[in-house]
Amino acid sequence: MAVLVTGGAGYIGSHMVWELKDHGRDVVVLDNLTTGFDWLLPGDVELAVGDVSDTGLVETLLRDHKVDAVVHFAGSIIVPESVENPLKYYANNTMASLSLIDACVRQGIRHFVFSSTAAVYGDPETVPVPETAPLQPVSPYGTSKLMTEMMLRDVAAAHDFHYCALRYFNVAGADPQGRSGQSTENATHLIKIACEAALGKRDSLTVYGDDYDTPDGTGVRDYIHVADLAAAHRLALDYLTAGGASAAMNCGYGKGFSVLQVIDRVKAVSGVDFPVHHTGRRAGDSHEIVARSELVRETLGWQPAHNDLDEIIAHALAWEKKLAVRNRN
């Protein structure tokens, strides 16, 4: 039996593939390679190039590989872009997920782990935010993910189908063994951008908004190491296959860092001082969002191994250096 990982050649998806392979699971990947790269994957993993909205292709993969669980990462993830082009996000995230879930139901797939987001909370009234907080996204990206969560809930009520929706906070870092990392050009992740600036790949870094109601005026986020996030997904699969009930759970550490704090740590870890410019806020950004993570720890037995901002940055820097060498060759 195998696990189908959609978006498995992307940043988080490729880490999940390595995590599954490290634990002896058979994996098949579906990715359209829009933002993914086949060279991030283990050499013995089959990659099907295509879209999750291609129901015929998905059903063939599920049948031919005797898939018993799906982990769904494929989708668009840039908050400001979702404000400018909401239909893209409802197509790539919500409608494509509908097609995938429909194929899973048709093929009798019972276990499904979904890549959701803290953006479903919008600007939470309580920080750290629990899973019971109101779901009131402030961007089409967050709404598109929430709509998929709602579909999963309703499908689970109607069929022998069980899911975990893992609500990510800010994912960063790279595989500690250097096998994968954030490789997309023009990525919007703060730590990646700051590392690029430290290594001279960018002339400077821009801070969007310094008038938020936070200690230093910049947005506060909970940064989670991508390897810890991949481990949470594997544990979610184990939980579901052992008969666990469907659930939505936060994935974060419960501690927030401001944009300026992150920049300062990148400068310290890299030993490089780079120019920083300030401009206005971006549409769809929340001022502060930090996870309460007791539920994922208690339900899945998740114990983070990389809960240290400097370690996250060090792994991200190491990956950027490796990526620079690869891109030169």
Image (cartoon, grey):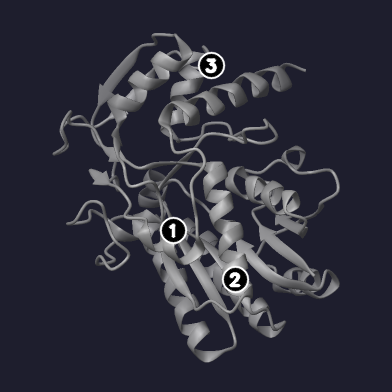
Picture residue at 66% right of the left edge, 44% below the top = 36
Of residues 157 and 293, the one drawn nearer to the viewer in this rendering: 293
Residue 173: % across, % down: 52, 34
Of residues 223 and 80, the one drawn nearer to the viewer in this rendering: 223
Q: Is residue 267 above or below residue 154?
A: above
- Say which of marks 2 and 1 sits in front: 1
Q: Earlier in the sequence, mark 2 or mark 3?
A: 2
Instruction: Determine whether 50 is above or below 107 in the image.
Output: above
Please provide percent x and percent y for residue 136.
26, 64
Q: Name the residue under label 1.
A: 297
Q: SS class of the residue under badge 3?
A: loop
Distance from Cα at disc 2 to Cα at disc 3: 38 Å
Residue type of the residue flagged with mark 2: Phe
> Looking at the image, is mark 1 or mark 3 nearer the viewer?
1
Q: What type is the residue that disc 1 sits on? A: Arg
Q: How many residues crowd mark 3 within 10 Å: few (<14), some (14–19), many (20+)?
A: few
Q: Distance between the residues labelled 2 and 1?
A: 19 Å
Q: How crowded is mark 2: few (under 14 residues within 10 Å), some or many (20 or more)?
A: many
| Mark in front: 2 vs 3 | 2
Residue drawn where x is 37% and y is 48% of the image: 84
Determine if residue 53 is in view: no
How far separated are the C-alphas under marks 1 and 3?
A: 37 Å
* Numbered tag placed on residue 201 in the rendering: 3
Which circle marks residue 112 in the picture? Answer: 2
In percent of the image, x 62 and y 71: which residue is there?
100
Q: Is mark 1 on a helix, strand or loop?
A: helix
Q: Residue 288: which quarter of the image?
A: top left
Which percent across, then down, holds residue 167?
42, 58
